[in-house]
Amino acid sequence: MLPTHLPILDSFMKHNSIRSAMFGVLLPLASSVAVAGDHFQGGIIFDHTSTPTGLLIRFDPAVTPMPTNCAGASSNWMFIPQTSKIIVAVTLMALASGNRWMTVYTSGVGASGYCEINQVDPAS
């Protein structure tokens, strides 16, 4: 949780309304920047499809990088095996409710050649 009062911001904002406007515009943009971790990534699901063996999802590759442990994956698709029924169900429920923002946790590139997801955390 952020503090409700930051004295350094008071002096910054007090002197120039243009700075205030810029800060108001840039702060929301800065908070939506996607940064990949070693085994996780947050972003907006850009596309999804299914196969007989599981569910494939992907973030927009122009905006959101893959987790670093998925370097070398055959594409930007991330795979949830059908044996992970709860993860598939949570993902599909989030998409059906219109919630496309999700953090995925990955175990690296699997035998499928895709980045394999082992946990999902939809935004609430």
Image: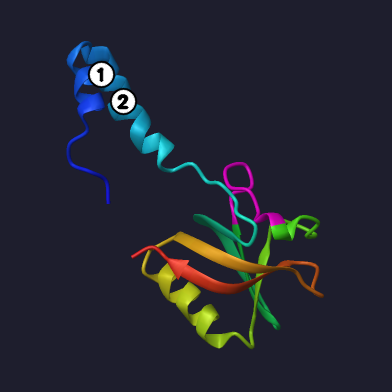
State whether the magenta stretch is mostly helix, strand or loop.
Answer: loop
Identify the residue at horizontal 78%, vertical 60% (top origin): 73
Name which quarter of the figure residue 101 lies in.
bottom left
Colour scheme in use: rainbow
Q: Which residue is mark 1?
A: 12
Question: Horizontal and vertical percent for residue 102?
Answer: 47, 62
Q: Is residue 68 left or right of residue 44?
A: right
Question: Horizontal and vertical percent for residue 95?
Answer: 44, 68
Label 2 packing within 10 angstroms: few (<14), some (14-19), many (20+):
some
Of residues 73 and 13, the one nearer the viewer is: 13
Q: CA distance from mark 1 to mark 2?
A: 10 Å
What stretch of residues is rendered in magenta?
Answer: 59-68
Q: Are marks 1 and 2 in contact (CB under 8 Å)?
A: yes
The disc at residue 23 is 2
Instruction: Name the amino acid type tagged 1.
Output: Phe
The label nearer to you, 1 versus 2, is 1
Identify the residue at horizontal 44%, vertical 60% (top origin): 100
Q: Is residue 2 above or below residue 5?
A: below
